[in-house]
Image (cartoon, grey):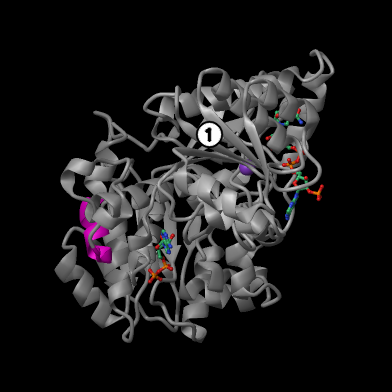
Amino acid sequence: MRYAHEVGKVRAAEQALMARLPEGALMRRAAAGLAATCARLLPGVYGARVVLLVGGGDNGGDALYAGAGLARRGASVVAVLASDRFHREGLAALRTAGGRVLKAADTGPVGAAIEDADLVIDGLTGIGGTGALREPYAGLARRTEDIDAIVVACDVPSGVDAGSGRVEGAAVRADVTVTFGTYKPGLLIDPGAAHCGVVELVDIGLGAHLPDPDVVAAWPVDLRVPQPGSESDKYRRGVVGVLAGSERYTGAAVLCVGGAVHGGAGMVRFASTPHPVELVRHHWPEAVTTVIDRTSAALEQVGQVQAWVVGPGLGTDEDAEALVEAVLSTDLPALVDADGLTVLARRRDLLRREAPTVLTPHAGELTRLLGNRTPRQTIEARRLECVQRAAAELSATVLLKGSTTLIAEQDRPVRVNPTGTPRLATAGTGDVLSGLIGALLAGGMPAIEAATAGAYLHGLAGRLAAAPPTDGPSGPAPGREAPISAQDVVTALPDAFRTLA
Ligand SMILES: NC(=O)C1=CN([C@@H]2O[C@H](COP(=O)(O)OP(=O)(O)OC[C@H]3O[C@@H](n4cnc5c(N)ncnc54)[C@H](OP(=O)(O)O)[C@@H]3O)[C@@H](O)[C@H]2O)[C@@H](O)CC1
Ligand SMILES: Nc1ncnc2c1ncn2[C@@H]1O[C@H](COP(=O)(O)OP(=O)(O)O)[C@@H](O)[C@H]1O
Ligand SMILES: [K+]
């Protein structure tokens, strides 16, 4: 797992540690780690041209000390001061090491230095950055776009809100971000995460002073999907029931069952109206299907299951509502997706239940679930805050889809999914995800673990489907990916599972 802590907790841990160390020791540790990474990224330090973008706080101090270290090893280092305030000891150290200093207002020489640089260290703002970058910080951040130099962000790319990943204006796009002590949520969550490049963590000894994390990113070693043993049979492995599709929306049913069939359930039971049932039988002969009378919503017709998935393509009429109500009245784990969520938005009373409930909204669906008080754009920009609020208000496990999938349960660290690709933003992939998570629930996984593993495998299947085979699970550069369909994601699921073995 990658652990991230809120900014306030990072500051408290730093204070506790600093109280036990000589003045300035912590900053010098951070700067030494930053300088070591920069030295590794350069073909050679001697003679390399390094520019430091220096803000008025301690983030600028880190950059100045790191620059001093590189200058002592023969680099030609220029510091660009964005503010009249700067870290005095850091600047003195740089000058002593032979570094030069410019002010941001010296636009000609500053532009030339950045153009000629081999490496730029962004020390404008770190965890102290608030709101959109003001001038001249914003202008300096923009100057780092489309340059040949390697851009290394100190602690956090400036312009990215460290606590949330929010980006409100200009922000540095780094090739590498060197962060100190612990990850910050904004380094793991988009849009901030997309500005970080490769994130390296430098240990500055904070560990013992840090409380439980606020956000964690799951890595393959953390995921324990159910494995069949010699005692297994199809019933013991878990049966998932899927209520999806309608005469109007048939594809959602086929895709959702596809996700469930490849999710490791012992059996998939599918129930719907005649047309989706016919199509599911055609595509997935292994599913056991039932044509149900929607008006009665009697789940006994479908047979015994260990978990339910309800919603994709279901429609939002009264019959659909009756099916959602029937599922949520059981004492079984249930996942509600798509149209089921639209129904739930007007029947939040149905969420009062003891058994685990997983909701898988995209930002628009979450807007409705939260009573239309939070616009979709706000949810997309403040994903962390909104998913936490939703989990608390709805008393459910909430998986918020989109460019970074987040999974929240009340009083637990929020999970961040590290896999995925923007190629997944295509119709029907969400239906595959809900079927997949339903199968994992039926296999007995706790709700948050099923949602975490499902998001991971789904994102990885998307990458495997989109990438040339040689690029592997860590994923190729986005330009090397091909468009994919939701069915391609289904097909790639077995390969995604195999990476966990
Ligand atoms: N504490 C420790 O032990 C350790 C801390 N460490 C390091 O310290 C960093 C935190 O330092 P910090 O607290 O000084 O804040 P920091 O990120 O430099 O930002 C403040 C400056 O930014 C400016 N500014 C803010 N918003 C702005 C905006 N929108 N637009 C423009 N300017 C804006 C603000 O300007 P002002 O408000 O003063 O005008 C002020 O000058 C942390 O990330 C890590 O790198 C490491 O050395 C390890 C040990
Ligand atoms: N920009 C993006 N980057 C990565 N993944 C994305 C992005 N946009 C959407 N996705 C993923 O694509 C899937 C789309 O699901 P959803 O919105 O429910 O579509 P549908 O209802 O058509 O199936 C989700 O898994 C979501 O996380
Ligand atoms: K920075």
Where is 90 relative to 117, above or below? above
User: Residue 29, how many percent across, how many down?
Assistant: 65, 19
Whether residue 59 sits left or right of residue 253 in the image: it is right
- The residue depicted at 79 percent of the width and 30 percent of the height is 88
The boundaries of the magenta stretch are 483-492
> Splitting the image into four quadrants, where does ligand 1 fall?
top right
The residue labelled by disc 1 is 2
Question: Residue 113 or 245: which is nearer the viewer?
Answer: 113
Q: Is residue 250 visible?
A: yes
Q: Quadrant of the C terminus?
A: top left
In x, y percent, where is residue 87? 77, 33
Q: Identify whether 211 is placed above or below 168.
A: above
Report x, y in % for residue 261: 26, 55
Q: Is residue 161 magenta?
A: no
Q: Is residue 346 left or right of residue 334?
A: right
Whether residue 387 is visible to the viewer of this picture, yes or no, is: no
User: Residue shown at 67%/77% (left/top)?
Assistant: 372
Element under label 1? Answer: strand
* Residue 485: in magenta span: yes
**What amino acid is found at the position of numbered circle 1 in the picture?**
Arg
Asked where in the image residue 227 lies, by quadrant, the reply is top left
* Residue reaching furthest to the right: 19
